[in-house]
Amino acid sequence: MQYICLIYSSEAKDPQPGSAEYPTFMHGYQTFTQEMRTKGKLVHADALQPVATATTISLESGQLTVTDGPFAETKEVLGGYYLLECESLDDAIEQAAKIPTARYGRIEIRPIVVWDD
């Protein structure tokens, strides 16, 4: 079964480029990504540009509204994701706990609905 691991954190709390913690933080991501590839669990993964680059739209009553920024004003924002092939939710939890941002924010794990073509 496929599970998406949505990576949420406060951009201000994550190790920042140039900080002493940043190289270790990024190495953690490289190590995790390689481990998931090696185990055959990685389906896809990407990071998102900073939340300041977000655009949110809605089309209520036929009226298009475009706003800068994310939909919700929150301290934690979606920063990226991993799509993993896991045997169970317990397996997905075990793998997601290795994502470096789990130490600074939260990882939301959700099963993927696969639509038959």
Image (cartoon, grey):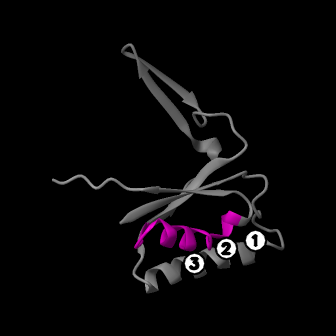
Q: Residue drawn 42% across and 76% down? A: 41
Say which of 19 and 113 sits in front: 113
If you read the primary sequence from the N terminus, does the residue marked by circle 3 or circle 1 appear first? 1
Find the magenta span and give its range: 84-102
Q: Residue at x 60, y 54 (%)?
A: 79
Report the front residue among 43 and 111.
111
User: Splitting the image into 4 quarters, where does residue 44 fall?
Assistant: bottom left
Residue 43's x, y, as percent? 39, 70
* Front tag of 3 and 1: 3
Which amino acid, by three-letter code, is at mark 3?
A: Phe
Please report whichever mark, 3 or 2, sits nearer to the chain's N-terminal start.
2
x and y, in percent, of residue 50 in the image: 63, 50
Q: Are marks 3 and 1 in contact (CB under 8 Å)?
A: no
Amino acid type at circle 2 is: Met
Residue most extreme to the left: 117
Q: Is residue 59 left or right of residue 90?
A: left
Mark carried by residue 26: 2
CB within 8 Å, label 2 to label 1: yes
The circle on residue 22 is 1
Q: Residue at x 66, y 79 (%)?
A: 27
User: How many residues crowd mark 2 within 10 Å: few (<14), some (14–19), many (20+)?
Assistant: some
Label 3, label 2: how many angstroms apart (C-alpha)?
A: 10 Å
Q: Nearer the viewer, residue 50 or 30?
A: 30
